[in-house]
Image (cartoon, rainbow, N blue to C red):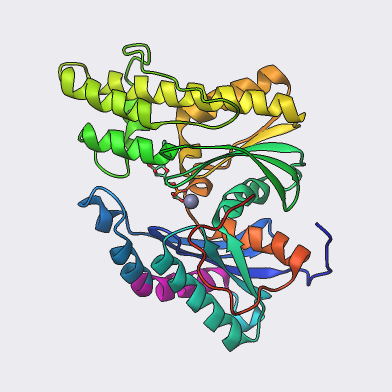
Amino acid sequence: MSEAPVADPFLVLGIETSCDETAAAVVANGTSVVSSVVSSQVDLHARYGGVVPEIASRAHVELLTPAVAQALVESGIDGSELSAVAATVGPGLAGALLVGISAAKAYALAWGLPFIGVNHMEAHLYACFLEEPDLEPPLVVLLVSGGHTLLVHMEDHGSYRLMGTTVDDAVGEAFDKVARVMGLGYPGGPVIDRVALTGDPTAVRFPRAMPDGYDFSLSGLKTAVIRYVREHPETPVADVAASFQAAVVDVLVAKAKRAAAEVGATGICLGGGVAANSLLRERILDLCTADGLRCFLPSRSMCTDNAAMVAAAAWWRYRADGPTPLDVGAQPNLRLA
Ligand code: KG4
Ligand code: ZN
């Protein structure tokens, strides 16, 4: 990435509306969070057992202006004192993305500021740099969220090679579906994480699918857990949760370990909502310690969707590419690499 000179401090208002969190944040120089507001819509979607796109879009319309106002008040910065306005342009739900993109463009025009479009998965990655600015590529990055499972070789800033992805369900999606069948509610990841703490991870030996290369396949595991729960209602929920979680984490850790060795990475970073998982964090840390790698685990609030990570990624993008043209639209299937 070539770097263009930018103002110091470079204050970005970041906006995130790609799924079910409405978020706004002000970040200085891509590394210092001045304010960060997340208005969760989880309660609105919980009764449906998953995110309902139309409800998400409508809720973003209602929640975004107050979230931006609060982020500005908490930062003590007036809109006109900002350096740029950024928003997630994809991947995500089309209608939800459009709310954030349209608002960000409007703020940018009103305040005479550049607009910066951000890739949501790159933002999850930059949550690591936000908290650990001296991290240095080459890195192996495992991005695991409700919609994505990406194993990425980050060769340099802005330079990514996709090593593996899921051939069916995303990791977070598997957590959510298994939790629903077990009657644990939505979102499933945090509940399974909590319930598994008291369970026996060796109680049930669920399959660990290892497709060739660095790809993942989770639907077989998901189906095995669902079938097991129906056939063995007597098994304690905590044991099933712990056994499922252990199977998922075994696969993620095995592939991340091999990928780091193959590319000669100096470290491994985790990102995305599932990166908040206690067992995954513990096992990746153990792997890095054993293999002499740096390990970076963003704080839990930085793993799940937020706007500080969007503003941080925007700072890096702006230095490389300058402003994003205002005719950019929502890109629901935007790729990282
Ligand atoms: O990144 P994120 O907030 O939203 C998307 O971009 O998808 O990720 C949400 C996903 C959900 O599937 C949720 O169940 C999962 O992350 N998740 C977890 C944990 N916390 C959130 N999965 C496992 N363990 C957790 N502690
Ligand atoms: Zn996300």
- Magenta region: which residues? 61-76
User: Relative to the observer, which residue lies in front, 169 or 155?
Assistant: 169
Tell me if 243 is positioned left or right of 29 in this view: left
For image coordinates 64% across by 58% down, the residue present is: 312
Spot occupied by residue 182 in the image (x, y as percentages of width and height): 22, 31
For image coordinates 33% across by 61% down, the residue present is: 53
For image coordinates 33% across by 63% down, the residue present is: 56
Exactly how many numbered labels are in the figure?
0
User: Relative to the observer, which residue lies in front, 144 or 288?
Assistant: 144
Spot occupied by residue 97 in the image (x, y as percentages of width and height): 46, 67
- Is residue 189 among what the camera can see? no
Position of residue 288 relative to residue 24, above or below, is above
For image coordinates 56% across by 51% down, the residue present is: 121
Quarter of the picture containing the N terminus is bottom right
Q: Quadrant of residue 162?
A: top right
Tell me if 151 is positioned left or right of 292 in this view: left
Task: Specify the farthest residue to the front.
Answer: 212
- Is residue 314 among what the camera can see? yes
User: Relative to the observer, which residue lies in front, 333 or 270?
Assistant: 333
Position of residue 110 relative to residue 179, above or below, is below
- Magenta stretch: dominant secondary structure: helix
Tell me if 191 is positioned left or right of 273 in this view: left
Spot occupied by residue 109 in the image (x, y as percentages of width and height): 59, 86
Position of residue 292 relative to residue 22, above or below, is above
Spot occupied by residue 279 in the image (x, y as percentages of width and height): 47, 26
Task: Please tell me whether residue 324 belongs to the stretch shown in magenta.
Answer: no
Tell me if 296 is positioned left or right of 231 in this view: right
